[in-house]
Amino acid sequence: MDFIQINVHCDPPFRDILTAEMGYLEYDSFVETEVGFEAYISEEKFSHPALQTLFNDYRKQTRIWYELKKIPKVNWNEEWEKNYDPILVDDKIYVRATFHESKPEYPYEIVIVPKMSFGTGHHETTHQLLALQLEVDHKDKKVLDVGSGTGILAIMADKLGAKSVAATDIDEWCIENSIENFGLNDVVPTFVKKGTIHELKLNEQYDIVLANINTNVLLNEIPVYGDLLVDGGYLFLSGFYEKDMSQILDLTSNHGLKEVKHTTRKNWVGLVLQKVN
């Protein structure tokens, strides 16, 4: 499966706005550049008319220029090696690629081969959920990572002492990538399954469910997340913009989920909820 790379030139204040909007169009990986950003989407999901409509809407407010390029799967590691830097979350979580030096002085180190999967820790959504995971007890908990991408959140759960971790995603590439990353971090998942949460029909319950996806998917799947949680269990959500938070909270409250804490970072939200009786 090939991917389409969109190299976007825009004014700095619109970089985050445009990446958020492109997230709604199912672009799932972004890399900041000096002139704007690069966005990636699978060829089968790419719609040039939808992209042109989006950019035309914003051209009244800012300058936008872009170019398209097809990226074969085999080239993705090379692209990341040119652009990927390690990150540090709350001075405790060090996320690096295999080609970076280890830094054992930090309490938690996660090694990621990013490939085309979403979830390297660079994006505001993943960064916030990693930080929020530090605030919730994972020890001896059963954890499910929905839309796992690289598997980074499940890996973090394992490092925080989870009894078991499991992962799902709809993309075969993400399944392959998360399995590879689990191996790099000595994580043995209960399962890594391909399919939507509706299709998989999981019949177990979990202490913690993690879902960093996008607004439309979250609104469709939150009722299932609630069913998958034990009473008192925690739901971590991200992948949505601050303007969408009210409809997320309206839905979660209707399914017995109470907000514990939320954070915002460049208008993206990280949200923790608890299932109450």
Image: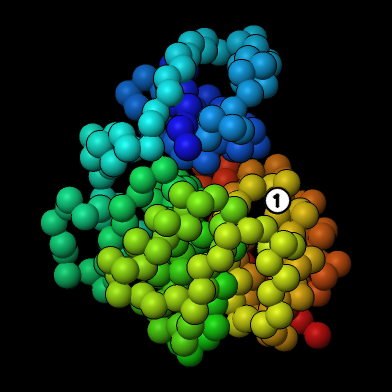
The image quadrant of residue 85 is top left
Give left or right: position of 60 versus 116: right
Foreground: 229 or 127?
229
Res 28 visible: yes
Residue where numbered disc 1 is placed: 217
x and y percentages locating residue 258 in the rendered image: 74, 72
Q: Is residue 269 above or below residue 256?
A: above
Res 54 visible: no
The image quadrant of residue 257 is bottom right
x and y percentages locating residue 202 in the rendered image: 69, 74
Residue farthest to the right, as pictured: 254
Residue at x 81% of width, y 74% of height = 256
Coloring scheme of the render?
A: rainbow
Residue at x 52% of width, y 41% of height = 28
Give left or right: position of 268 versus 38: right
Q: Secondary structure at mark 1?
A: helix
Name the kind of residue labelled 1 in the image: Val
The image quadrant of residue 238 is bottom right
Q: In which quadrant of the rendered image does the C terminus lie?
A: bottom right
Residue farthest to the front, as pictured: 1
Mark 1 closeness class: few <14, some 14–19, many ≥20 residues within 10 Å: some
Foreground: 226 or 267?
226
Residue farthest to the bottom, as pictured: 140
In this rendering, the count of numbered labels is 1
x and y percentages locating residue 110 in the rendered image: 30, 64
Foreground: 41 or 120?
41
Residue at x 55% of width, y 13% of height = 62
Q: Is residue 3 above or below residue 201?
A: above
Residue at x 77% of width, y 54% of height = 220
x and y percentages locating residue 102 in the rendered image: 16, 62
